[in-house]
Image (tube, rainbow, N blue to C red):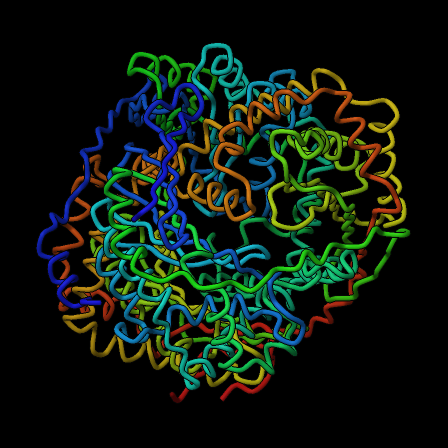
Amino acid sequence: MRSLWAIGLALLAGSAQATLTDVTLDNGMRVIVKEDHRAPVMVSQVWYRAGSMDEFNGTTGAAHVLEHMMFKGTKDVPPGEFSKRIAAAGGRENAFTSRDHTAYFQQMQKDRLELAMQLEADRMANLVISDALFAKEIQVVMEERRLRTDDQAQSVVYERLMAAAYQAHPYRRPIIGWMDDLQNMTAQDARDWYARWYAPNNATLVVAGDVKADAVIALARRYFGALPARPLPARKPQAEPAQVGQKRIVVKAPAQLPYLLMAWHAPSLKDWEQDTKPYALQILAGVLSGNDSARLQKSLVKTQQIAVNASAGYDAVARGPALFMIDATLAPGKSVAALEKAIRRELQRIQHDGISESELARVKAQVIAADVYQRDSLFYQAMQLGEYVTAGLPPEALARRVEKLRAVTAQEVQAAAQQWLQDDRLSVAELDPQALKPQPRRAVPGVRHAN
Amino acid sequence: MPIKTFFFALFLGLPLSAQAALVIQHWQTPQGARVLFVESHELPMLDISVDFPAGSARDPAGKAGLAQLTHGMLDQGAGGLSDTAIAHRLADVGAVLAGNFDRDRASATLRTLTSAAERTAALDVLARVLQQPDFPQAVIKREQQRLIAAIREAEADPGTVADKAFYRALYGTHPYAHDESGDPAAIGRLTRGDLQAFYRTHYSAPNAVISLMGDITRAEAGAIAERLAGGLSGAAPVPALPKPALAAASDTRIAHPSTQSHVRVGAVGMARNDPDFFPLFVGNYVLGGGGFDSRLMREVRDKRGYAYSAYSYFMPMREAGPFQLGLQTKLEQTDDALKVARETVRQFIADGPSEAELTQAKSNLTGGFPLRIDSNRKILDYLAVIGFYQLPLDYLDTWVDRVNAVDVAAVKQAFARRIDPDQLVTVVVGRAGGAR
């Protein structure tokens, strides 16, 4: 007997055509369909609830390496063929790995969904990881690490700050993995990862676009429904112990301008109906840097001119805990200490005096408008659904997000700033720029290369 | 799983063309601004782009950075509103004012809800920013410092250093040679008078292209366009840019404290209205534009693991923009990777694509065409390009047919005309020595 349950969720008023179907197949795979008939296209995404937070020391980066290996062939589809077939059908495809998940997507004309599903289902169960292809691909991943992290001073600051802010929780490890772990990774490590996490009962299919939910579910049952569920390893919470005092690190890297990154431990959204603090923290980030003259920009960049850029950020949707972050790039001729002091003064103003009703209304107006604007992107709509579901939140939490944010009061924002932006929860990283030591460039006009 | 039969069935049954006709309305305002409009009522929002030939190629001699600074100053005080008042008025109605800036174009884009109060407030700010920038002296000084700081900061990024050196090596004395952001010393010397003069001559109605996409009627679009163009100066269209000369082979090596070398190889490529546009565009898919489907990715990444990204592209501009091939690789294998990349180009130019490769390229491009126009944002971007570069209004309607019309011979001939593998410009940032 197949158990099949579906909920249709009418989303916000005004989007009558955008309905959501949420189904779980017999083997535990979840299927979410969002119909959107504006253009004759669709996006299909398969989300695995396995990201860098599920890794072990010594094999950090395994989730991301496996993502690369997923394009390297199965029993029936030779290496490179996956991309080739999607491309031949006019598709665009790629994948991404985060701390919480690994996801694979195809964007195509609406009637080519079956191809995407058939190939995804195949590599969910039948991946072949050869030693030879692994040996090449791990070199590619190391180049990716050099490109995105090692040669980007601010990325190094972020990576090292994470490792300092978290001592026990696996969010301390970089998604791409430490270089030494990549250098010592084996094809067997990738195979182990695949065997551990790539099962239908650890996956969610999200399809958005000009499709019919019934037809999508029928296809999903045909291709993914045939794959057996497998027992998944127990996941330990690995909760971060309470911080017992401020942490500070200095990062030396080739750069021109000092940069400051501050992170406070903060709650993520768990009980979406009862929690109020994550919504208040989201509004707080908007008050601090939601527009070109929000508090941080106005005070630090425009008035005091102590920073050339400043911003605040907070992401409530995560499997693990959250951080509330502020970063700023120092203006030439100013001191990092003075910059940090100026940032703290802005936070104290909110903690002591609160925020104005007009600031609150401004952030809410942006939230409401952004909710309309995001409907212009199918990909983003599917992406948000995947993130919520993978983080353990129902699609309803996403549908009612605007309503929850609109309910936040100025007092709640002030209280959130008081409760969470405390020194004992704070980690600070400062980029100490190292000289680039430029050498005169050597131009050799007319040189022929004998290739 | 019976994969083979499945694929067979899939490809036989499908019509290739799923494009719904996109109706572009086009007219001129009484002030001489050109307008492109697509009406769409599915989402209660409006996107506008106003484009001017005011990119960095228009920087006067000795004032590299003037175009960028002028563009950046537009919304930092206008029509009596301070920078803060502008930012707050926009945010209060959830509107997003942004802009694009490159060597050819400077543009302001607005995204707003179409409910009356929101739309009215947002359009009021856009009109002020375009028509009455105040260029406050104190704000100019601040933005000069920020622009210079951004340029300095980018000096640490090997990819940015490589791109700047590549344009310099490729374009010599042509206005495309210098960086879009300009030169710190020149920026420091710019005056308020410089900004005002540049603004008056470039941000005029006859220079403007206004693109609108979204939930308004033709009559409303007409009124908005006329209002936006109404307060602009009547300065005559800017003169044509000089034609770039073909670059001779050169090899520039710049030492950098990075773990990777950033490699750029290329030549002067094609202009936006080039008759070879489609053969070069489709052919480049096979060489380095098609991601995992391309030869460069296969040779550099898949076969050898040399780089995360290896690509080539033509950047069509008002005058001939660059053809560029790029990759990043750890310092010690710089020369090996460069050699593979150059050989891949040389062989492609000598032999052209195979029939199978070209068929694959065309199926991807034509089959993927609906993805190019599946959102208001993407359609707006096309309107701005069609308007600014004066492409035919049926550009999108004929796009699939023109891709399909490309054959192997056309690709081969077009590449042979443009790219001489013995005259490539090479830039390597990272490892300074060791040229073979």
**Residue extending farthest front:** A1
Image height of A178 relative to A3, above or below:
below
- Residue beneath the point at 67% across and 25% down: B83
* Residue B138 seen in the figure: no
The front one of B332 and B126 is B332
Q: Nearest the camera: B32 or A53?
A: A53
Compared across the picture, whether A120 is left or right of B364 comes to right
Most distant residue in the left direction: B12
Residue A240 position in % (x across, y down): 76, 55
The total number of labels drawn is: 0
Residue B243, given in percent of the width and then of the height, sits at: 36, 54
In the visual, does B197 lie left or right of A228?
A: right
Image quarter hosting the N terminus of chain B = bottom left
Q: Looking at the image, which residue is at 19% across and 40% down? A: B19
Q: Quadrant of residue B386?
A: top left
State whether residue B310 appears in this view: yes
